[in-house]
Image (cartoon, rainbow, N blue to C red):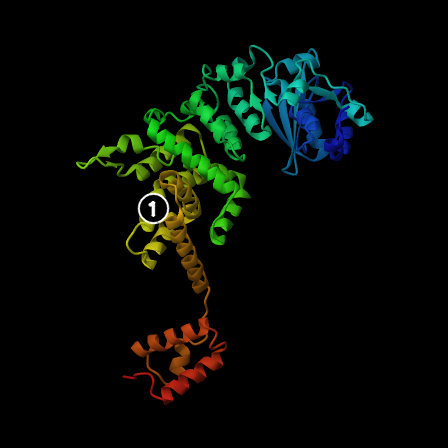
Amino acid sequence: MINLEPIGEHEPLLEKLQSLLKTPLYLVGGGVRDLLLDRRILDLDFAHKGSGVKTASKAAAKLGGAFVPLSEADDEARVVINKELILDFKGFTQSIEGDLADRDFTINAMAVKVSDILEGSPDLIDPFNGLRDIKRGLIRKVGPGSITADPLRVLRAYRFAAQLGFEIDPALEREVEFTSLKNVARERISYELMLILAQGSVYPLVNRMIITGLLPQIFPFDEFWTDPSVRSHTLAVFCTLERFLAYPRFHPLITDIIARINTNPRRKALLKLSALFHDVSKPETRMRADDGTLHFYGHDTRGGRKIRWALSRLLRFSNDDTDRVSETVARHMHLHLLATAPELTERAMRRFMRNTGEAAEDIMILDLADGFGTAGRTRHLEHTIVKILELAAEDAKRADFKPLVTGHDLIELGLTPGPVFKEILTEMEELQWEREITTKEEGVALVKEKLERGEYKID
């Protein structure tokens, strides 16, 4: 018996959609899968005998949604309602079983009649044993030609594994090694990749995507992928970053940053992408000094340029996302240098915040993971980060600070602008910060008293 509770909120919508058609309307794909998993459903896929595009157009008009054509050749279109609920429609000419045979994985190749859902007695149409695979937690392709029909499906397999916590069928994962993404639209690859990285703990999946050659296909950085020491360190940093995001045990100011990152899935994905490629240019910058020590001068800035090229040219990321990742990679060494400097000056801390801009917080969290991955400790970095954040908070307060006593007040007291102005105004600001004076009148009265006592040197 199928539990209909997850789809209960959509019953009025289903009634309106069914009324548009004389032929049966089927809920298919991810909607059925999520129904069986008792997950909230925000994406509903429909199939019926007839034109999917025409039905989507009618649905958009009836429901007040936005009509989005997807593929005229495949007779697919989308309706978006209130920017949240997505309805996809696809037509078929033969049978619902034939439609399901063209889908990617068995867990997405099931259907239920909408009319049966409304009557409260749905029968599951499951020609490829999708329900069995859901129970097994297995992602298995529908048929021999599933991947050939759409090579992006190999990346989608890892996405579903990340989202659902399922395992990928070994036969399917072996096929990944021989599947080319060369002719797949870059935007589709970017979309799936970001969904994977936005999930919680995906380190094991990312490692397997490297082993199967999937990530090296997407990011053709041959020297990086074939360098065992750099790759090992990178994966250690990536794994540590995920652990820090999941279980932050830092100063409250740092924990606040992690909380902000975790509430923004795209930002979290971009940070993980930065971690994955923060040392992408180490192999080509490696040099050994006379004393035998290794150096990687300029690997950060060079890496920033390399990942900028990949994201903007190869994967068509937005300018904002490209800037965020490339700046994080290019400047990730600055904080390490500050943390190991003989003296941590306010000027250096302010320069760091000014130069890193919006990437500052991402760099801080990445460098904590990098520091732990390199030396197994983060205390020196934590201390530096807290100092920077405290100074930035003070600077922000001062930027909004409005002095009670101004130069005009001093002129009204009969003083002439000069060095004494700075001395008096600085002292009044400090007393104001310390809450020793709380009104202009108190401040002016105090200046008068000090003038009468001769505490200021008047030229």
- Which residue type carries mark 1? His
Res 418 seen here: no
Q: Position of residue 111 (x, y in %)?
A: 70, 20
Residue at (63%, 25%) from the top-left corner? 77
Quarter placement of the C terminus: bottom left
Q: Position of residue 281 (x, y in %)?
A: 32, 33
Q: Position of residue 93 (x, y in %)?
A: 68, 12
Label 1: element kind? helix
Residue at (36%, 43%) from the top-left corner? 332
Quarter placement of the N terminus: top right
Q: 118 and 347: which one is in front?
A: 347
Q: 102 and 4: which one is in front?
A: 4
Res 168 seen here: yes
**Name of the residue lying farthest toward the left:** 290
Question: Is residue 148 positioned above or below 347 on the image?
Answer: above
Question: Is residue 431 positioned above or below 220 on the image?
Answer: below
| Residue 228 horizontal side relative to residue 137, left or right | left
Q: Position of residue 436 (x, y in %)?
A: 46, 77
Choose top left, top right, bottom left or bottom right for residue 140.
Answer: top right
Choose top left, top right, bottom left or bottom right for residue 407.
Answer: bottom left
Residue tagged 1: 336
Q: 109 and 80: which one is in front?
A: 109
